[in-house]
Image (tube, grey):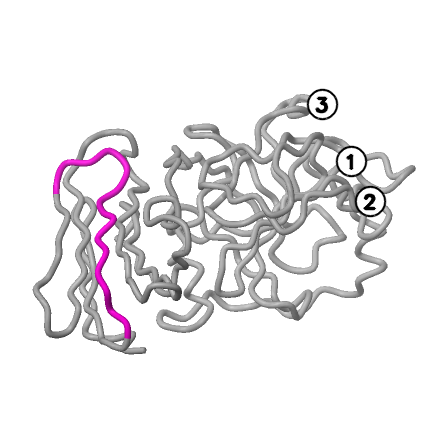
Amino acid sequence: MKLSRAMIACLALALSLGTAPAAMADPVPGSDQAQILATNFQLPFPCNQSWTGNSGNSSAHQSWEIDFNRGSTADADLGDTVVAAAAGTVVISAHQGSTNRYGNLVKIDHGNGWATYYAHLNTRTVTQGQTVSQGQQIGTVGNTSAPGNNISPHLHYEVRLGTNYPDNIQKAVFNGVTFGYPQQTVTSKNCGNPYTPTSVCGSGYDVIDSATLGTDGAVYLLYNSSNGNNCVTTIKYKNAGTATATTAYLEVEGSARKTDSGSYGYYAGPVIASASGKCVKWGGKAGSSTYDSGFEHCD
């Protein structure tokens, strides 16, 4: 089986990093680990492609990493497109074969301590410091590693929370569903929305809170420290590009609520209001899912 050949890729990595940690439980609702659902990670491959992931055929795996393949021959996947599982900032785009045998590696920081890793890439199409949107191409499937470490093409994918490796490796969640470890074939719902909260709200705004809207999208609260303004936008995940009912609102304590509601293809908002030193209510709707906050973020 082709996936089993991926174990050759990482055998030395296992020897250098030690034994695998004890299995971690699924994130508890409301816990820090459950934040992974708030980012609504999608499969790191283009819309409607089906890929088989396996966490059990590589002796180098520490816990919940996944090796992905879909072709029937050893080189069938070489050069296939790899995309960002969620929006974020590229913090590594480099060949790291001699360091950790990951070869061409892209690491994306998604905020709040969450990051995804895409290893053994044939090519990298993003650079360090670049902001990427969910579904944006970041590279291609490859077999790069350390010199002399011959492996078959596959994508090595990881989700991490924090810096305490390897205990920070988390179970992967795609489209709101935890991957069926140790092996599952998954069809990508990473169908692309080129907009991010910061691209909608503009320069100077940073995400300070977010809430998922089922699998339909997410609503984001941003703040601009230079002018004291808050911004709310609802970003669609489902039916991106097709006009559907979408809403975003922001209410500053003591002022009338501002709402943007309509039939939109990608997002609602930006809804912007001055809120320095005041509490705000914020929320939105996409599909059949709604989020409404109480008054909070009173700084």
Residue at the extreme left of the image, as rendered: 256
Q: Using the image, determine if residue 138 lies above or below residue 38.
A: above
| Residue at left offset 49%, top offset 44% | 85
Query: To which quarter of the image does residue 18 belong?
Result: bottom right
* Mark in front: 1 vs 3: 1
Left or right of 212, for residue 293:
left
Say which residue label 1 marks: 144
Earlier residue among tags 3 and 2: 3
Earlier residue among tags 1 and 3: 3
Q: Secondary structure at mark 1?
A: loop
Percent position (x, y) of residue 42?
44, 43
Left or right of 100, for residue 220:
left
Question: 105 and 131: which one is in front?
Answer: 131
**Residue 1 visible at all:** no
Which amino acid does the dot numbered 2 rest on? Gly
Earlier residue among tags 2 and 1: 2
Q: Which residues are magenta?
A: 262-276
